[in-house]
Amino acid sequence: HDTVGVDCVAMCVNDIICGGAKPLFFLDYMAMGKNVPERTAEIVKGVVEGCKQAGCALIGGETAEMPGLYAEDEYDLAGYSTGIVEKSRMLDNRDMAEGDVLIGLASSGCHSNGFSLIRKVFNIDRDPDVLNRYTDRLGKSLGEVLITPTRIYVKSVLRLLDEGLSIHGISHITGGGFYENVPRMLPAGIVAKIEKAAMPVPPVFDLIAKTGKIPERDMYNTFNMGAGLVLAVAAEDASRAVAAISAAGEQAYVIGECVNGAEKGVELV
């Protein structure tokens, strides 16, 4: 319960920085069948941790107890965040062009996406004990890997923007993977050509694919596959960007480039 709040904050603030904005504050909403104070405190603890990582304030929230609508051991957690950016510094892809370099920032795992498929692949609803089983391929139990919170990239990306590098677009790789998220940052006529081998894929994704016999395209259309954030950077600033991201504590990889195309989209090679 003390990690889900990090995920909730991350889904908001990682989206905000795609526009070049700094998150200012966050509010949460919890609905549950029964308010168990100790559990609620653990949930809020995770929200606070996420806000710390994002450098924003937790200024309020709402808790709704709804017996009959939720079971006693169930709860819903939602969140909202506001950010700010100078209009002149907004990232709106107007300068993105052929030759821009694509940089991937390593994810911490599945983040907050694809869990309906994950539950089905590992039959978790019928066999929850599978989460406690140690897997050599993962180096820990499946449950430990799946519960790893979403990485929050706010401070690293803001540092990059403050250095004045030519960042032309940012895409947060959430549900829908590369095929649905990367095009959101692309202007008409630009294709993101991405080399799959350029970035390490965490073992959990290989395990999911093999266990569920999931085609590769479906994996890249569902999960982040190791890249939680993708940046489009002017070619002349690419090496400096990778160095700055690494100095900020992230793992960064050049994973492709922007090329001209009839329509905007993604090509994985």
Image (cartoon, rainbow, N blue to C red):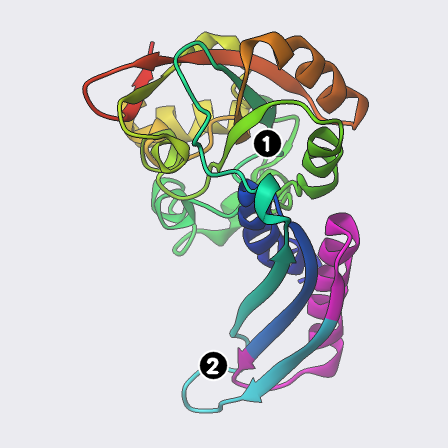
Rendering quarter of residue 249: top right
Q: Position of residue 124 (x, y in %)?
A: 43, 50
Question: Residue 205 colored magenta?
Answer: no
Q: To which residue does mark 1 refer?
A: 107
**In the structure shown, which secondary structural element does the residue marked by tag 2 occupy?**
loop
Structural distance between the alpha carbons of marks 1 and 2: 33 Å
Mark 2 residue type: Ala
Of labels 1 and 2, earlier in sequence is 2
Mark 1 residue type: Ser
Which residues, given as a range, are shown in magenta? 31-58
In this figure, what is the number of numbered marks?
2
Residue 224 appears left or right of 62:
left
- Which of discs 1 and 2 lies nearer the camera? The answer is 1
Rendering quarter of residue 65: bottom right
* Front position in the image: 166 or 191: 166
Residue at image x 43%, y 51%?
Answer: 127
Q: Is residue 221 above or below residue 79?
A: above
* Front position in the image: 140 or 215: 215
Q: To which residue does mark 2 refer?
A: 71
Rendering quarter of residue 265: top left
Residue at image x 60%, y 23%?
Answer: 166
Q: Could you tell me if residue 4 is visible in this image? A: no
Q: Position of residue 163 (x, y in %)?
A: 75, 27
Residue at image x 32%, y 21%?
Answer: 190
